[in-house]
Every structure is written in C-alpha cells, then in structure tokens.
C-alpha cells in the first residue's frame, strides 16, 4: 500500500490529518505538484483525472478522492470514529462534511486557483471575476459556522470528525488564497485554535 501525496495541497492534507488522527502509518510517495508531477504518465495511469491524493492498495486497486480514501480506512479502523457514531451521528457528520466542503473549502480553493499568480499555468483560463466572487461566499459560510460553533465544541457535535478536518484545511488555505478572517467570529477562532493544537494538524 502507498499513498501518492501532494504536500500542502488541501486534499492530500485532509488524508494525512485523518491518518494522523487514527494513528495509521501509510508509506507516502511525494509528488511535486509545482513541477506538475501529478500529470506524469505514472500518475495518469493511476488516476486519469491527474489529481491527488491517490491510494494504491497492495493488489493494485486504486482509490482517489480524499473522503473516499478516508472512508476506506474508517471501515478498516473504526476507532476513534471520525465519521460519526450511530444513525444520527453519522448523518450529522455527513451533513456538515458536505456543507463545509461545498460552502467553505470549494470557494476558498476557487479564489486561490483563479487569483493567485502561481496558478496561471494550472487554471487556463484564470477567471479573476470568478475568484473574487468566491471570497464573499466563503466568508458568508464562515459567519454561519461561527454562529453554529457558539453552541458546541466541534462542527458536527461534541466529537472531532472529518468535518473538522475539512474545515481546518479550508481555514488554513485562506492565507494562500488571500482571504482574511473577519474581525469577531470568536467562536470560529476558538474552534480553530483547538483543532490546530491537535498533533494531527501538523501532518
């Protein structure tokens, strides 16, 4: 088994943080996305979409998409549960994971991809108007999240989950996307400090 990893990119980081929370060691194959190694023939054969991360199992089976990879390991190693417990707990984690991914991580990533000069060769064409349009979308969800976090320690409830991992990665990616966290939002900031203090956040 080996995991083709993309360094600081959000989706590869999501998987590394998840694995660190679980205490699972998987051999990493570093892929330099800055040098377009994710578009190499070797990676394209494993994932024709030429995206990371890519998990290759011992029998040659390939899994892509960060949450799908995490779900695979969740089935193998259910403790500690990061996708919720029981019917309601699992549904709440799924709901919040989806909300965070679509309304926070996605717009932050779009702002980065369409506005950052380093992405000119990646996004062809870069559409600056689309990048700018995604900034207020991310901030609107951040304000919503701040209100939700006023009543609980983690995004989907009392326990840390994959929804927190996705939100942590999105929050940290705001800096390269050049989106500033607004003043106030004390509940969000307290949550971010808590999850950033977890050893897994350094993965």
Image: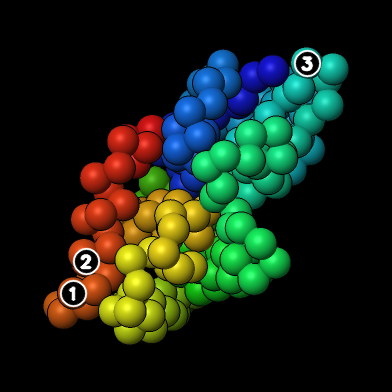
- Disc 2 target residue: 189
Question: Which label was assigned to residue 151?
Answer: none
Q: Residue at x 27, y 70 (%)?
A: 188
Q: Residue at x 38, y 55 (%)?
A: 168
Q: Residue at x 53, y 26 (%)?
A: 24
- Disc 1 target residue: 186
**Label 2–label 1 contact, CB within 8 A:** yes
Q: Of all residues shown, which one is farthest toward the front?
A: 86
Alpha carbon separation for disc pair 3 and 2: 41 Å
Bin the neighbour count of mark 2 within 10 Å (Cα to Cα): few under 14, some 14-19, many 20 and up. some
In terms of sequence position, does the residue under pointer 3 or pointer 1 come before the other? 3
- Disc 3 target residue: 58
Residue 199 spot, x, y in % from top left: 31, 36
Q: Horizontal placement of 117 versus 37: left or right?
A: left
Return the residue nearer the eye: 60 or 179: 60
**Label 3–label 2 contact, CB within 8 A:** no
């Amino acid at each position: 088994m080996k995991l083709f990893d993309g360094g600081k990119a959000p989706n590869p980081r999501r998987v590394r943080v998840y694995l660190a929370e679980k205490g699972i060691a998987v051999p990493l194959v570093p892929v330099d996305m800055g040098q377009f190694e994710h578009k190499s023939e070797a990676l394209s054969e494993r994932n024709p979409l030429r995206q990371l991360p890519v998990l290759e199992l011992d029998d040659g089976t390939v899994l892509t998409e960060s949450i799908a990879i995490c779900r695979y390991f969740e089935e193998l190693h259910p403790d500690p549960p990061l996708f919720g417990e029981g019917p309601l707990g699992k549904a709440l984690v799924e709901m919040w994971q989806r909300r965070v991914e679509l309304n926070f991580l996605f717009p932050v990533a779009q702002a980065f991809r369409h506005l950052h000069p380093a992405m000119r060769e990646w996004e062809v064409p870069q559409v600056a108007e689309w990048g700018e349009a995604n900034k207020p979308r991310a901030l609107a969800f951040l304000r919503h999240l701040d209100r939700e976090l006023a009543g609980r320690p983690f995004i989907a409830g009392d326990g840390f989950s994959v929804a927190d991992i996705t939100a942590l990665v999105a929050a940290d990616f705001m800096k390269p996307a050049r989106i500033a966290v607004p003043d106030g939002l004390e509940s969000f900031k307290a949550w971010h400090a808590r999850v950033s203090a977890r050893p897994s956040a350094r993965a």
